[in-house]
Image: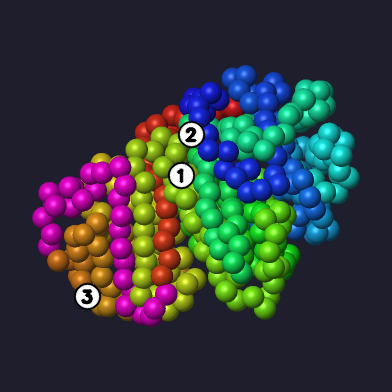
Amino acid sequence: MKTVDASAPTTAALTFAQGFRAGGIAAGLKESGNPDLALLVSDRPANAAAVFTTSAFKAAPLHVSMRNVRSGAVRAAVVNAGNANCATGAAGLADAEEMAELAGEALGLPASEVFVNSTGIIGHRLPMNEIRLAIPRVVVEADGGGQFAIAITTTDSVVKEASAEFEANGVTYRIGGCCKGAGMIHPDMATMLAFATTDAPIEPEVLQAGLTWAADRSLNMVTIDGDTSTNDSVLLLANGAAGGTLIDAGDAAGIEAFRAGLLVVMQSLARQIARDGEGATKVIEMTVSGAASFADARDVARSVVNSPLVKAALNKGDPENWGRVLMASGYAGVAYDQDRLRLWLGETQGVGGGASLGVADEVVQAAARGDTVRMFLDLGAGEESATAWGCDLTEDYVRFNTDYVT
């Protein structure tokens, strides 16, 4: 089973923004002995926004985090890997509540200001004795974002981090984030576990709307295997440590700049997840344009990158790609005029006017040979577009998940 190299260098992106500290340690939850418990905290009060899985079967920590985020005072997070604390009943909920209390005590905060996450195998109680001993030992530091990013991984082979800057009202602000995820990836909110911070002063409503907007165009557009997790969630904290004017609902320019910076971070994380898909050898990037709405473009793009037949074909550079892409676009639930449809694989157009252009098999194979395969589909129905990311389907994916026990 692949695991992250805990000694590998990181960018500490999660603590790139001013006024945040983080850290991670090995608490003994992973059989590998790698870091598996992490803390994040803002040194000052922060506004929080979050998105959560739409699965009807949510893990215990999500119930605690959803309640705490609604209170509007969250400024810290505690995360464990190796155990999802899901399908654990009332006892699991009590364990999640205790994690918030333990983290709050360690950081000098009330439990209501702590976001709780768990990731790993489903159906097992958390080893709370190890967690009770470990949380007070986590050292949170201004350069600790990398240790946090390492500690939240499960089947990941690499640490996933990204950062960006944006300027609003004459001040330069920072955004940084990290995530984990390589399998059970097909989000219906955000995806997997992801965390982001910014030192910009942002009104809560603007922060939440911005996160939802960015997630819909990044983390909600990545799929590995079509399975939506019970624990998916994304947290964004804004503490205003860099100063400046509050970015509120009346600040259109500030909102645009904030969203642009956040999107850079979130789309980078999405691409990193696709590249690290379990058993994957190549990334699939599907851009759909000419759609009547963003929702139409999104649904078609996701349908294509999630198709097992498309994923398997691209693994081998199969020249049947054209037919499989058209097949997957057709069952996305989006109405379009197939006679207006055009399709490219890389720079090679294979379909025009809804019909094959007779491109030679060797040309198609060459376009699908790299470690990133880019496809472009124009529906000819409007001006909206969306891009989705996925990966090829290999024999290793089946082997990996047959053996998976974390």
Measured in 3D between alpha carbons, the distance from the residue under mark 2 to the one under mark 3, in whole angstroms, is 42 Å
Mark 3 vs mark 1, foreground winner is: 1
Q: Which mark is residue 272?
A: 1
Q: Residue at x 18, y 48 (%)?
A: 365
* Residue contact at pointers 2 and 1, CB within 8 angstroms: yes
Q: Disc 2 on helix, strand or loop? A: loop
First along the sequence among labels 3 and 1: 1
Most foreground residue, 344 or 267: 267
Instruction: Check disc 2: other Cα within 10 Å, few if <14, some if 14-19, many if 20+.
Output: many
Q: Position of residue 145 (x, y in %)?
A: 62, 38
Residue 167 visible somewhere in the drawing: yes
Specify start and end residues of the magenta stretch as a single range: 358-384
Q: Disc 3 on helix, strand or loop? A: loop
Judged left or right of residue 322, residue 178 is right
- Three-letter residue code for mark 1: Gln
Residue 256 within the segment the image draws in magenta: no
Write down the residue under mark 2.
Answer: 158
Write down the residue under mark 3.
Answer: 353
Judged left or right of residue 57, residue 215 is left
Judged left or right of residue 8, residue 363 is left
Q: Position of residue 173 (x, y in %)?
A: 60, 57
Q: Residue at x 48, y 31 (%)?
A: 157
Q: Quadrant of the C terminus?
A: top right
- Three-letter residue code for mark 2: Val
Instruction: Check disc 3: other Cα within 10 Å, few if <14, some if 14-19, many if 20+.
Output: some
Measured in 3D between alpha carbons, the distance from the residue under mark 2 to the one under mark 1, in whole angstroms, is 9 Å
